[in-house]
Amino acid sequence: MPSKLLTWQATTLAATAMAAILPAAALAQNQGPTLTHETVLSDLQDPWDMAFLPDGTMFFTEKCRGLSVLLPSGDVNALLGIGGSDGFSSTGEDLFCEGQAGMNGVAVDPDFDENRFVYVYSASNLTEPGGNRVLRLVVNDDLSEVSDRTDIVDDIPYKPVATDQPFGGPGAHNGGRIRFDPEGHLFVTTGDTHNAEVPQSPTLIGGKVLRIDRDGEPIEGNNAPDGFDPRIFTYGHRNVQGIAFRPDTGQPVVAEHGPWHSDEITALVAGGNGGWDPRPGEAGRGECPDGYCGYEPNQMDEMNPQERAEYMPMTDLNTYPDAMKPAWNNNGLSQGSVSAAFLSGEQWGEWDGRMVVGLMGIGFGGTPVGQRIDIVDLAEDGLSVNNVTEMALPMESGRFRSLVQGPDGNLYAAIDEGDIYRITPE
């Protein structure tokens, strides 16, 4: 019997091929449950991701330090540090932090009770000039150490040098989110690394969403086009750092950074093209700095966001008419949509089953703009949204790097400024 996800994909692929981008929905008025918050951890260094065990044990990563675990008792065990980090039970001397790269995503195996597996996405210098890897680790019984490191993916591109592009430093557009779907498959999101050839490349696995098993092998039904790496589930992405799965169908939905416009939320279809292609010469463009048109034209040019979107589209439906259509484009703005989860449980009232998306906020002139959490009511077909509501936050906003619903039903939010919050509906 075909899975619910595959059945949905067959229906949606046909609809996507005929669809055009609809006007973006405006943010609705704040509504939903009253929220309170508690600070779970503070004074962290760039907390990047979280993953839970059923008893509330929380694994978390700090981009430039490593992997740790918060126990139900409140104690923290530092498990695997990147090279140069102190206080960890073990250190990966090949692991490093630079720019957006470092110790990024973390995921717990659905069969953790049997195999004790935890996975992290991290930059490594084992391959020159550096790359990203997915590491599988075994956690001991008292959650104080990890061992038996196995690198199940070792060829995710990394940007090693600065360029003339805006925000062109090393480690840029690094992807890094890893999540298990309801069927036990591991999804890995990667970035285009400011390399124009990467997103549409059949063999380079940057600018992609991968779907693999716990050994790093491709899942049957990924439906990658002929000649593509079989681990590829979707391609043609810019920098996906948010992925979550619809509670009713298991369909993956991603949140993706836009260039100077159009952060996107897109429901994925196996084998689908995200439509991002920053190569010079595509869509009538000429040459671009460092051969990468992903920032052309510049934010400071006279064009408005719609004109910029037409010149360098985030999803180029003219060049790729069968590309996956985004459901939401943040009203044509680029504010750093970076994390995603689906809320579940009657405690969330009308938000039960809706998607939450964290935005870091993009500030020019030192002023942050758009730091918030959006509540997204995704249409049944995944091709549009019914409405988008800004969450009335019970605490000060920040650069929301990770959103995860914990086993207690509450929403946990990590911000770059160093805190992890628990947001509770009353």
Image (tube, rainbow, N blue to C red):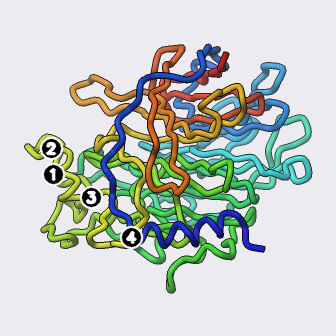
Q: Earlier in the sequence, mark 2 or mark 4?
A: 4
Residue at 44 percent across and 44 percent down: it is: 100
39 and 20: which is toward the camera: 20
Residue type at the position of mark 4: Met
Question: Contact, CB < 8 Å: mark 3 with mark 1?
Answer: no
N-term mark: 2 or 3: 2
Do the residues under discs 4 and 1 have CB atoms within 8 angstroms? no
Mark 3 crowdedness (10 Å alpha carbons): few <14, some 14-19, many ≥20 = many
Instruction: Residue 312 in the image: state x and y as whole percent.
Output: 23, 58
Q: Secondary structure beneath disc 2?
A: loop
Residue 412, numbered label = none
Alpha carbons under labels 2 and 4: distance apart: 27 Å
Quadrant housing the C terminus = top right
Number of marks present in the image shown: 4
| Dot 2 and dot 1 residues touching (CB under 8 Å) | yes
Is 387 situated left or right of 262 in this image?
right
Q: Is residue 21 among the parts visible in the rendering?
A: yes
**Residue annotated with mark 1:** 307
Residue 313 - label: 3
Which residue, given by chain and number where applicable, does mark 2 sit on? 304
Disc 4 versus disc 1: nearer the observer: 4
Residue 64 visible to an observer of this rendering:
no
Three-letter amino acid code at the position of disc 1: Glu
Inspect the image, locate mark 2, and give the three-letter code of the amino acid beneath it.
Answer: Asn
Look at the numbered disc 1 and give the secondary structure of its residue.
Answer: helix
Residue at image x 33%, y 45%? 24
Measured in 3D between alpha carbons, the distance from the residue under mark 2 to the one under mark 3, in whole angstroms, is 13 Å
Pinpoint residue 420: horizontal percent, then vertical percent. 60, 24
Specify the farthest residue to the bottom.
226
> Which residue is disc 4 drawn over?
18
